[in-house]
Image (spheres, rainbow, N blue to C red):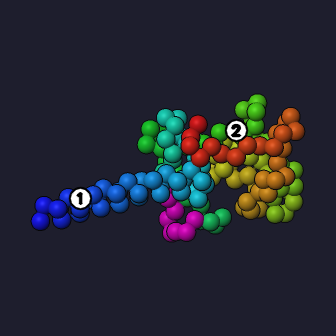
Amino acid sequence: MRALVITLSCIVSLAAAQSTFIETFRQGLGFQPPLQCEDDSWADCQCDQPPCGPDNLPTCTCKDGSQPTIDPPCPEEEYPLCPGACADNSDALLTPNPLVDPPCADKSFPNLFKCRCADGSIPRPPNPFGR
């Protein structure tokens, strides 16, 4: 009986740890927006009706009360220029919070391969491990 209780405790502990790992992994790889808070925690993003999509954007909040943002992906801590990156060939305007200020007026997701930093370099992807 004692061995059964210990075994069940271990299974529950592993399941809880795996759930936390999977959630961190999911957030860090951008299956949800890689928005971070001022305290360097990940923003909590939820959709009213899953799954999230262009017509069903998530609402993201920070436990510390700060506004969730994406760090600038360019060397000079700026956002890149993205000419013709939207589906309608208009320019995308990347900002710290794309959920509040969508980068494309047509609500499409911009083709980030068309984006370049002011110095001509390719923007770096979001850091999956935080700032």
Residue where numbered disc 1 is placed: 9
Residue occupying the far left of the picture = 1
Residue 88, relative to residue 45: is it above or below? Answer: below
At 74% from the left and 46% from the top, the residue drawn is: 94
Q: Residues within 10 Å of mark 1 (few under 14, many from 20)?
A: few
Q: Amino acid at mark 1?
A: Ser
Check disc 1 and report its element: helix, strand or loop.
Answer: helix
| Residue 67, picture quadrant | top right
113 relative to 106, above or below: above
Magenta segment main secondary structure: loop
Picture quadrant of residue 16: bottom left
**Location of the C terminus (image quadrant):** top right
User: Which residue extends farthest front?
Assistant: 3
Q: Earlier in the sequence, mark 1 or mark 2?
A: 1
Q: Answer left or right for 131 relative to 123.
A: left
Which stretch is magenta? 45-52
**x 49%, y 51%: residue:** 24
* Drawn side of residue 26 relative to residue 121, left or right: left
CA gap, disc 1 and disc 2 = 44 Å
Residue 72's disc is 2
Q: Residue 17: x, y in percent?
A: 38, 54
Coordinates of residue 40 in the picture (x, y in percent) = 52, 37
What's the residue type where badge 2 is placed? Pro
Residue at left offset 47%, top offset 55%: 23
Q: Residue 27 location in percent, x, y? A: 54, 53
Q: Nearer the viewer, residue 71 or 12?
A: 12
**Quarter placement of the N terminus:** bottom left
